[in-house]
């Protein structure tokens, strides 16, 4: 790759990282946010209402993905990527500065909901935009470049966890409720504004710029009429990735506390998970460039279905170190996490790629991230069944969905533009 292409991937990777950091930091401080914006006596606890606002932000992401995806397909990747970063960063920064219910009353609560809605809309285009840039930047290693994007995502999870730990250890509970939670959003907003400033130097992706004169502006209905099978397959493939995050990141901490693991053990194991999966994603994505990546993904789906029941069996009996189990989970999850996004992006033609990738990824990931922790909780408490069934079901659905993904052939000119010499298209 040229120096400009390496710079493009570095900048694009901040998109996925920004999306993850902003949403995770809200989850960490949900209790403090609830105390600041939702008073007692409303019929539900402040923490519950805070999580409702978190859900609103998640549910708005598919709509934002469609909006920014269409913007990226019609007017260019660069303008969509710039717009989403700027608006999301401002919304995040304003949440950190927003007066509490005690100062502004119900207007403070309403503005929090509005800012989360705007933030969700914009972040719906961040991760798909980063994936599209990676696929369209250089032909030789599209899988590895997508892998770099998801390395940034997992490092952002690690960074958000470190910010949370630093604030929890530096401030008292009263200080956290008063102003400590705001620091996380101010950091996220500052990082977002820095990302926007850097992205202003970003050019169009090589493939998009090369074929800009030959593009067709297909109507929005064409996404579902002509690419229905690939869209549904993309959504299905994302279920496994979302389920892995939903179970290992969102659900397991509370489950492990119930079965007598202490908070320090859980936090240490999760941080090791983030680092291991980030490293292994690079390996899995590189392998996906050497062999058909759908085979690597399917191997990950099968291993996930087999490994997760044993994981829950081992943690319930404290028979294996929790850190070792999380390390193994990171290795297994990396096979799907390192290949799914590039496989989805390669299934769509240039004219609708951004829209289709954003639609498929947001619908699949939001569905899995939102429902798998709840489904696991219901299985455990109401049905007395193993929460592992959730991941097994998503793994089987994703395995079946992977057979619906195709590989679009690139125009020869686009390939030559990105590499400088003609290459044969991989079948």
Image (cartoon, grey):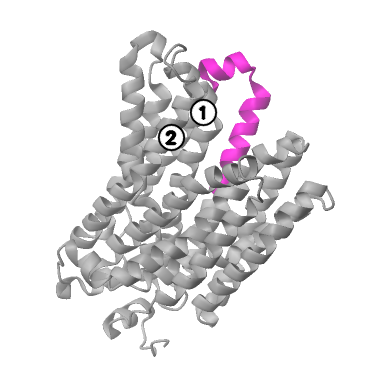
* Mark 1 element type: helix
Where does the N terminus fall, quadrant-wise?
bottom left
Residue at horizontal 63 percent and vertical 50 percent from the top: 387
In the image, is residue 183 part of the stretch drawn in magenta?
no
Location of residue 248 with respect to 49 vertically, above or below: below
Crowd band around label 2 with a 10 angstrom C-alpha radius: few (<14), some (14–19), many (20+): many
Residue occupied by mark 1 = 30
Q: Earlier in the sequence, mark 2 or mark 1?
A: 1
Q: Residue at x 51, y 71 (%)?
A: 399
Residue 9 position (above or below residue 380): below
The residue at the point 14 percent across, 64 percent down is 219
Q: SS class of the residue under badge 2?
A: helix
In the rendering, at what x and y percent does residue 362 appear? 38, 53
**Magenta-highlighted residues:** 155-180
**Magenta span: chief secondary structure:** helix
Picture quarter with the C terminus: bottom left
Q: Could you say where residue 254 lies in the image, as x and y percent from the top left?
A: 65, 37
Are circles 2 and 1 on residues that touch, CB within 8 Å?
A: yes
Return the residue found at the far front.
383
Query: Label 2 belongs to which residue?
Result: 54
In the rendered view, does 200 fall on the left or right side of 131?
Answer: left
């Amino acid at each position: 790759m040229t120096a400009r292409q390496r710079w493009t991937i570095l900048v694009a990777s901040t998109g996925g990282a920004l999306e993850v950091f902003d949403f995770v930091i809200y989850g960490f401080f949900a209790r403090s946010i609830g105390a600041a914006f939702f008073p007692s006596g409303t019929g539900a606890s402040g923490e519950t209402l805070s999580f409702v606002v978190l859900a609103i932000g998640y549910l708005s992401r598919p709509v934002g993905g469609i909006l920014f995806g269409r913007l990226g397909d019609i007017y260019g990747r660069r303008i969509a990527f710039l717009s989403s970063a700027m608006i999301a960063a401002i919304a995040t920064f304003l949440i950190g500065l927003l007066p509490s219910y005690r100062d502004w009353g119900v207007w403070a609560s309403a503005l929090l909901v509005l800012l989360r809605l705007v933030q969700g809309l914009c972040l719906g285009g961040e991760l798909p935009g980063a994936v599209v840039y990676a696929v369209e930047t250089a032909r030789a290693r599209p899988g590895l470049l997508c892998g770099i994007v998801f390395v940034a995502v997992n490092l952002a999870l690690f960074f958000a966890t470190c910010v949370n730990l630093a604030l929890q250890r530096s401030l008292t509970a009263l200080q956290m409720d008063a102003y400590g939670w705001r620091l996380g959003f101010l950091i996220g907003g500052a990082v977002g504004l820095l990302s926007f400033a850097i992205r202003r130097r970003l050019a169009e992706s090589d493939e998009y710029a090369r074929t800009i004169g030959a593009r067709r502006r297909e109507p929005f209905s064409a996404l579902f009429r002509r690419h229905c099978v690939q869209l549904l397959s993309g959504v299905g493939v994302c279920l496994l990735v979302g389920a892995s995050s939903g179970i290992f990141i969102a659900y397991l901490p509370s489950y492990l506390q119930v079965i007598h693991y202490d908070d320090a053990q859980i936090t240490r194991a999760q941080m090791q998970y983030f680092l291991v999966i980030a490293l292994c994603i690079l390996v899995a994505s590189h392998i996906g460039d050497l062999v058909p990546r759908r085979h690597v993904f399917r191997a990950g789906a099968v291993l996930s279905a087999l490994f997760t029941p044993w994981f829950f069996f081992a943690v319930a009996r404290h028979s294996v170190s929790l850190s070792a189990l999380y390390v193994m989970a990171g290795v297994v999850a990396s096979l799907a996490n390192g290949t799914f996004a590039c496989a989805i992006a390669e299934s769509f033609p240039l004219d609708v790629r951004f829209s289709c990738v954003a639609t498929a990824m947001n619908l699949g990931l939001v569905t899995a991230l939102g429902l798998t922790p709840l489904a696991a909780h219901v299985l455990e408490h109401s049905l007395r069944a193993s929460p592992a069934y959730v991941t097994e079901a998503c793994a089987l659905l994703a395995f079946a969905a992977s057979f619906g993904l195709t590989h679009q052939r690139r125009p020869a000119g686009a390939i030559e533009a990105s590499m400088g010499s003609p290459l044969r298209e991989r079948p």
